[in-house]
Image: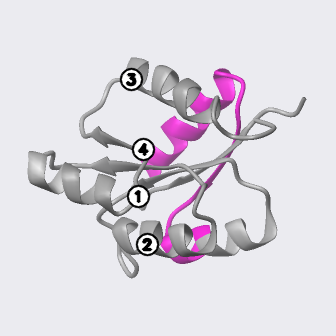
Amino acid sequence: MAAPHILIVDDEEAILDMLVDVLSILGYKSTGVQSAEQALAVCASTTIDLVITDVVMPGMSGLELLRTLKQERSTLPVVIIAAFSAPEEVREMLALGAAGVLSKPFEISEIEPLLGRLLSTVPGA
């Protein structure tokens, strides 16, 4: 069985590179892009099992990306990385279809159990 393919979307190169490296070490296939527009192009041409996206990015935001992905592939799990974590904002993200929210700064140890839980419900992952 192939490793689940996770797409990471973050305009901050250091965070993007760190997440790609960590997910690779954890045994996932990971691809990193720096914009929501690039993410949509990857999703259109590649099988992606889960998306991790920052909220605040130039151009299309992570929330706009979430809305678009949920319209195109309603079952695709999307995890939001947010620098804010007010309960009402988290509720809004979950209401839009986010499968989880990681608040910056987050610990690497928070990622593995979240991904394991979300990917256990993905067929073939």
Q: Which amino acid does label 2 sit on?
A: Arg
The image position of residue 8, as x and y in percent, is 55, 51
Q: Are marks 2 and 1 in contact (CB under 8 Å)?
A: yes
Magenta residues (range): 13-39
Residue drawn at x 52%, y 67% is 70
Q: List the residue tagged with mark 3.
A: 110
Rounded to the nearest angstrom, the CA distance separating label 3 from label 4 is 15 Å
Please tell me whether mark 3 or mark 2 is closer to you in this view: 2
Question: Toward the viewer: 41 or 47?
Answer: 47
- Whether 32 is drawn above or below 40: the answer is above
Q: What residue type is labelled 1?
A: Gly
Magenta region's main secondary structure? helix
Quarter of the image holding residue 107? top left
Q: Do the residues labelled 4 and 1 touch (CB within 8 Å)?
A: no
Q: Neighbour class for label 3 at 10 Å: few (<14), some, many (≥20)?
A: few
Mark drawn on residue 15 = 4
Q: Neighbour class for label 1 at 10 Å: few (<14), some, many (≥20)?
A: many
Question: In the shown orientation, is residue 18 left or right of residue 54?
Answer: right
Please tell me whether mark 3 or mark 1 is closer to you in this view: 1
Q: List the residue tagged with mark 2.
A: 67
The image position of residue 58, as x and y in percent, is 35, 76
Q: Which amino acid does label 4 sit on?
A: Ile
Q: Which amino acid does label 3 sit on?
A: Glu
Sequence-first tag of 3 and 4? 4
Q: Do the residues labelled 2 and 4 touch (CB within 8 Å)?
A: no
Q: What element carries label 2?
A: helix
Please tell me whether mark 4 or mark 1 is closer to you in this view: 1
Mark drawn on residue 97 = 1
> Where's the C terminus, which quadrant?
top right
Q: What element carries label 4?
A: helix
